Amino acid sequence: MDTSPDTSFVCPIIIEDDRTGLDTETIRRALRDNLLYIQGKLPELASKNDLYMALAYTIRDRLLQRWLTTQQTYLKKDVRTVCYLSAEFLVGPHLANNLINLGIYEQVQKAVSESGLKLEELIAQEEEPGLGNGGLGRLAACYLDSLSTLEIPAIGYGIRYEFGIFDQEIHDGWQVEITDKWLQYGNPWEIARPESSVEVKFGGYTESYTDENGNYRSHWIPDYVVKGIPYDTPILGYRVNTANTMRLWKSEACESFDFGRFNRGDYYGAVDNKVHSENISKVLYPNDEPIQGKELRLEQQYFFVSCSLQDLIRIHLHENPSLDNFHQKWSVQLNDTHPSVGVAELMRLLIDVHHFDWDKAWFITQNTFAYTNHTLLPEALEKWPLSIFGRLFPRLMEIIYEINYRFLDKIRIIYPHDDGKMSRLSIIDESGEKYVRMAHLACVGSQAINGVAALHTELLKKDVLRDFYELFPEKFSNKTNGVTPRRWIVSSNPRLTFAITEKIGENWIKHLEDLRGLENYVDDGVFRDYWRRIKYDIKADLANYIAKKVGIKVDPSTLFDVQVKRIHEYKRQHLNVLHIVTLYHRLKNNPNLDITPRTFIFGGKAAPGYFMAKLIIKLINSVAEVIDNDPTIGGRLKVVFLPDYNVTFGQRVYPAADLSEQISTAGKEASGTGNMKFSMNGALTIGTLDGANIEIREEVGAENFFLFGLTTEEVYAKKAAGYNPQEYYYHNEELRAVLDLIGSGFFSRGDSSLFRPLVDNLIYDDPYMLLADYQSYIDCQEGVGHAYKDQEHWSRLAILNVARMGKFSSDRSIREYCEEIWRVQPVKIELPDYIQANA
Ligand code: 475
């Protein structure tokens, strides 16, 4: 079969109105048409999902011209392109965002309602692609949005997991994981491109030979070869014609059936290879920070990286005579170390396949890659046992040894006789079992290295990557994270969007610093009143949703105190619980105590193998059950754990929060991005001096931020001096009462063993220093309660928070990456005349 473009086909394309028109009438007609001819459904038999699908195809049609024109323009203009390599893209639902970015939300709403439907209901039909765990994957998605909005040529490369992050159910207070079948009714946003498949080698051995020029070379004879099939999703920018591509790879077997084995009677064995090949892109590993050294995970990483680099090389050679200028045309960003095997793979492709010599290949490689680190937890730094790595990729192992050998040779000159330095810097960890240190490979093979918030970058330089910083300080820089206001304000909070736009126009959506204009209205009592009414309505919506989902009635006039994020000890959801139990304990001892009524809302998934995180979920639910059913509390405290926290639910909850909990141990959270989403939506923050909290506080002003807890220096000093949590336990009566209450079985129907591991861990070890920060947190929360009582004052603070969040748009982050790391320029996309321009 010939799958290459056929240039003899001459046919001026006249695009029918129905696939491009943006007016209500055309959209209505197109919707009906797609329902019949794509979904194959008569209107009277169509389900909500059929109608959603028909609408999704209607909108995709409107993306296609923009997308194809974008790709064509890039080819014609021979542009420099950013390539974002990420094992995760947590993009969230596409439909609403595409409507907003196209500027046709109202038209579509009208078209849909004229057909007797509600747009919001169709939008709610979309199954979100959960192709990520949390912060890192969601950041990649925000960055794709900003890259397109800023008209930067870019491709996002990743894995098309058949099963994304598991759905979470809560049974008897415990997390239960359910397979995420996001593809079961089809995915209207992607287009498969089997004609662009590539092959990836695994296992086997290498053979050395001498080439025609007398050079010593190596040849990889693999055990098996897996096929990667690209699936493309257009990512449209906000009110521009740029639609970049997110290209996700699905793995398949090259040969689906082994006739040799079949003929020998080995019927199951005949499909072994097919099963193994398809397994590679089958499921997302649900571990957030600490990695588990699972072989399949390493296969996933190499699979998508090799596919992506081969794809880039093919695109490059289509436009250029050789790969000599590869690094001038592509800037490849490594989203953490998960794709860092790319350093060795690009070397292999240049040397083995394209016959470069080492030095030239290394020059190109080093000038192509840049590396972002996302974590300070030592246990999350990826390393792979040499035994596994060498068996899966024998040729890459040789290359890594050679990279390391040449690197250490240079080190030896700079630091003669410093063996400690050598072994600390080496790409191979030889302290016990041998490992490949992926962060070292990334550092050596990249032209730039960055952290994701100011404090994080400082800690990388001082601590985690200290030796590398000493060696090449010029490679290091900070790029504080940001989030896209299109999804996290416009799409998720239409009421706030309307209120802001009414006052300052709509420029802020693309230039978030313009929110500063809102400061002019903090003294406007009418505006503050309006602001409060909006917040109340949003909270009332969430209250309805909570009642429907978990059957708990919450009062929208109480303070909504929210912590949503992955469950992890360092994020300290259990510190939040200690505060809740403290308030409960106070109310039990003093039933008439005057406290600010609060609704505590939690959401988040625990890694399935993370015992302590799962116990924290059980604790939250157990405390909730007791408090919510205690009539003496009279609704002054409510605790809700909302199951299955994801992007869709985030969009509902950030706008409804009064208080944002950002309470990690100082020095542990690289940046955080939820902290930004809350604050942009008018929540105030209670937080430690950690990650981007520090910069948020700088922007909004110390008087607008509830600060508590030890600083990073104090955490380090305390650890060094021999931290003993028992001192806090014995010296703080209230704290002791709270821990004892939890340990006694009071929240676990008398079972005093249930929460013992958690309580004992806090009293005897407390690696995240909850007890050291407890009193400071409790006192700070008291301040929050007081502040909330003065609603006029609270509204002022909330408005100022929103007004001063401009820095945290991902547009700002992406501009910094573009100027300082990628050195790429925007490229305007002009649509052909016959396409109706955006609104
Ligand atoms: C940080 N995920 C946040 C966010 O920069 C930060 C690790 C291994 C395997 C799979 N996923 C991971 C992370 O390391 C991660 O999500 N890190 C987070 O990156 C974006 O805002 O502080 O914890």
Image (spheres, helix red, strand yellow):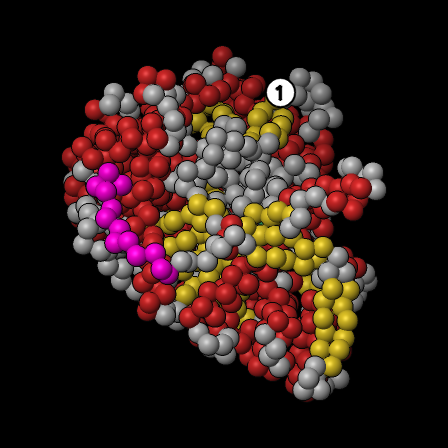
Residue at 74%, 64% in the rendered image: 221
Q: In this view, does 716 lie above or below 22?
A: below
Residue 114, given in percent of the width and then of the height, sits at 21, 24
Seen in the picture, residue 77 relative to 804 is either above or below; the reply is below
Of the pair 465 and 97, the residue shown nearer to us: 97
- Residue 51, given in percent of the width and then of the height, sits at 35, 26
Side (left or right) of 220 relative to 80: right
* Residue at horizontal 64 percent and vertical 33 percent from the top: 614
Question: Secondary structure under badge 1?
Answer: loop
Q: Is 18 one of the magenta-colored residues?
A: yes
Magenta region, residue range: 7-19
* Residue 833 visible in the shown view: yes
In this orientation, which residue lies closer to the viewer: 261 or 805?
261
Figure disc tally: 1
Residue on which the image places disc 1 = 172
Residue 824 coordinates in the image, percent (x, y): 37, 69
Q: Is residue 431 left or right of residue 563?
A: right
Q: Which SS does the magenta portion mostly show? A: loop
Q: Residue 736 is drawn in which quadrant? A: top right
Q: Is residue 314 magenta?
A: no
Query: Residue placed at 71% from the left, 26% from the top?
Result: 754
Residue at the image point whose x is 30% and y is 50% from the top: 65
Q: Residues within 10 Å of mark 1 (few under 14, many from 20)?
A: few
Res. 506 in view: no
Q: Is residue 333 left or right of residue 798?
A: right
Taking the view exactly as shown, the residue that stands out farthest to the top is 631
Q: Is residue 583 above or below residue 376?
A: above
Identify the residue at the far right of this view.
264
Residue type, numbered disc 1: Asp
The quadrant in which residue 348 appears is bottom right
State the image coordinates of residue 382 (x, y, percent, origin top left): 66, 57
Q: In this view, does 279 lie above or below 224?
A: above
